[in-house]
Image: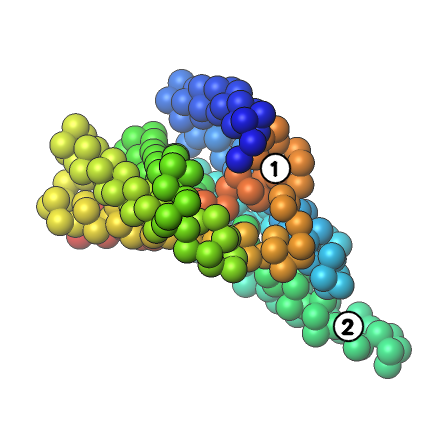
Amino acid sequence: MKPGNFWLRFLTASVGLPLFFVLIFLLPHLHHLGFNLLVTAATVLGALELAGLLRVQGLHPFRAIPYLSGLLPAAGYLQVSGLLPWGSLWATLAGLVLLVLLGSLQARRQEELAPMLSKTASSLLVLLYPGLFAACVVLFSALPEASLSLLLFFSLVFVNDLLAYTAGTLARGWSRLGYAVSPNKSAVGFAAGMAGAIGIAVLYRALAPQLLPVSYPAVIGLGAVIGALTILGDLVESALKRSARVKDSSMVIPGRGGVLDSIDSWLLAAPAFYLFFLWVWKYI
C-alpha cells in the first residue's frame, strides 16, 4: 500500500472508530437504532456497488433489488424491537426471493427471455450478499449483552484485519502465497490475523466473563472461526472485484475504496458469531 493510502486509512479510522463507539455505547437507545440505521444504509450502498460489479461482467440484476436488500436488516431490526414477530426476517427473505423469481415472468416477447436466467441469478446474489449477512449484525442487538457483543465482534474483525495486514506487509517478500484471488496475501498475515482474533476472544473471556460464560477452549474456537471467516470474507469480495477487473468496489471512502470493501471482512463472520451467542444464551 502506498504511504498516502495508509494515512487516508488512518484518518478514516480516526473518524470511524469514535463514531462506532458513540453509536454502540452512548446511543444504545431503541435497540441501537442509530447503529442499525447505519448497517441498513451500508447494506444498500454495498448492494449497489455489487450490482455495479456485475454490470461490468454483462450481468444486469433487476434495478430495484439493491434498494430492496435493505429490507432484510430493516426487518431484522423491527423483529428485534418487537414491532414484528420473530421469524419476520425469514419471511421477508422468502418474500423477496419470490419477488425476484416472479420478476422473470415480466418478459413479453421471446427475445426478452434470453437474459432472464442471468438477471434472476445476479439479482439473488445482490439480495443475499450483503443483505442477509448484514441482517445478522442487526440481530446482535437482541443479545442480552448487546453493546459488549457488538464491541467483541468488531474487535475480533478489526484486530484480525490489522494484524493480518501489518504482518503480511512486513513478511510479504518471503511468505506471499501468490493466490490468484489476492496475490499479496501472505501465510504470515493469515497466521497473525488468526492469532489476533483468538487473543481478543481469550482477553474478553478473562475481562468480561458475563459476556462469555463458556470454557476457554470454546472461546478459542470462537476466535479461530471468526478469524477464518473474516479472512474468507475479504477473499470472497476480492474474487468478485478481480472478476470484474476493478481494484475497489467504489471510491466513496478515502483510503478504503467502497462500502463493500469496508464491510466485506465481517459479512461472512456475522452469522457464525450470532449462532454462537444463541448457543451460549440458550443452552449454557
Q: Residue 53: image x %, image y %?
A: 68, 54
Q: Residue at x 16, y 49 (%)?
A: 218
Q: Residue at x 41, y 51 (%)?
A: 176
- The crowding category of the residue bearing disc 1, from other C-alpha atoms within 10 Å (few below 14, some 14 to 19, many at least 20), is some
Farthest-out residue, front: 174
Residue under numbered circle 1: 257
- In primary-sequence order, the first of circles 2 and 1 is 2
Residue 37 left/right relative to 101: left
Residue 196 left/right relative to 46: left
- Residue 192 position by quadrant: top left
Evaluate if marks 2 and 1 touch, with contact meaning CB atoms under 8 Å apart: no
Q: Residue 281: image x %, image y %?
A: 22, 45
- The crowding category of the residue bearing disc 2, from other C-alpha atoms within 10 Å (few below 14, some 14 to 19, many at least 20), is some
In this picture the colour scheme is: rainbow
Q: Residue 63: image x %, image y %?
A: 75, 54
- Distance from disc 2 to disc 1, alpha carbons, whole Å, reads 30 Å
- Which dot marks residue 70? none
| Foreground pick, 187 / 95 | 187
Residue under numbered circle 2: 115
